[in-house]
Image (cartoon, helix red, strand yellow):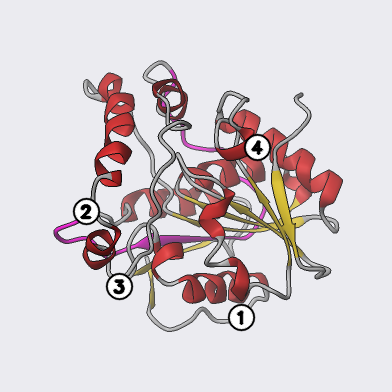
Amino acid sequence: MSLGLYHTAHNAGQTTVVLIHGALVSGLYWDLVIPYLTSYHLLVPDLPGHGKSASAPFSVDLAAQQIAQLIRTHANGSAHIVGHSLGAQVAIRLACTEPDVVNSVFVSGFGMFPQTSLTPYIPYAAWVMPRVENCLSRPLISWAMDGADIPRIDTNVCTLDLCRQIVSPEDPTQWPSPWPARTLIVVAGKGGLVPTKDSPGDAVKLMAIGRELNEETIAYTHLKMRHPWNRQDPRLFAETAAAWFEHKELPEGFVKL
């Protein structure tokens, strides 16, 4: 076990929430959401291979182990877990393997990447895409993404090795085992010219697995939200998380799958 993940902590609330970012970014990707979760004690790690944890290699298993260590060391008991995109994979692995540190789970952008003939080329595409996107103006991207504030990727961190670790042709992602925590699974439903909607099929299958141990696990879609909706409507993202933590109704606009 390494010395642990770099993380930031926010607020003095009694209830801890862990925010797990997606691929090729860092905990800074939550900067727009954090101001709307002031009543919670927040732990915001940089995943292995990312941000200020870049010296460690990435794997979903290692990330889950290190976040469990982070919770045991710094949380107020167990924690609510929020995972976006790659962070959703980590959140579900954490809930499966370290259930004692998990209170509830909220994931968005969960996706499976089954092995195909194109799988060996995906790391190269993942390496190229941020470099192309970095060349585009931020106002253009914001317009195309319904106002989402998408920061430029640090290409020094976005190495081909990291892309291979995230999308390994030799180790394709596997469906998880059932886990006990009640879990909200959200599918961003807005696509169109820019293909940024998530997979409803993956969400429904994930929900079925989760419901084997907790019948409260549920999946919803929101047809106005794009994949990075924590950057598109951070207030809605935070309100959705808080509603789930507090066993309240979700904000308007969500449709059950």
Query: Tag 2 or tag 3, which sits nearer the N-term?
Result: 2
What amino acid is labelled 3 in the image? Answer: Lys
Q: Which residue is drawn at the image coordinates 42% and 84% (left, top)?
A: 252
| Image quadrant in which you'd find residue 163 | top left
Query: Tag 4 or tag 3, which sits nearer the N-term?
Result: 4
Magenta-highlighted residues = 171-194
The answer to whether residue 115 of the structure is visible from this angle is no
Residue position for label 4: 64
Residue 192 falls within the magenta-colored stretch: yes
Residue 178 falls within the magenta-colored stretch: yes
What amino acid is labelled 2 in the image? Answer: Pro
Secondary structure under tag 1 reads loop
Q: CA distance from mark 3 to mark 2?
A: 13 Å
Does the residue at mark 4 contact the one at mark 2 (Cβ under 8 Å)? no
Secondary structure under tag 2 reads loop
Label 1: how many Cα within 10 Å (few below 14, some 14–19, many 20+): few
Q: Nearer the viewer, mark 2 or mark 1?
A: 2
Residue position for label 1: 248
**View extreme (top): residue:** 170
**Camera-side residue of 73 and 56:** 56
Query: Tag 2 or tag 4, which sits nearer the N-term?
Result: 4
Left or right: residue 65 compared with residue 254: right
Query: Tag 1 or tag 2, which sits nearer the N-term?
Result: 2
Residue position for label 3: 224
For the stretch drawn in magenta, the main secondary structure is: loop
**Camera-side residue of 117 and 228:** 228
Label 3: how many Cα within 10 Å (few below 14, some 14–19, many 20+): some
**Camera-side residue of 212 and 28:** 28
Residue position for label 2: 195
Q: CA distance from mark 4 to mark 2?
A: 29 Å
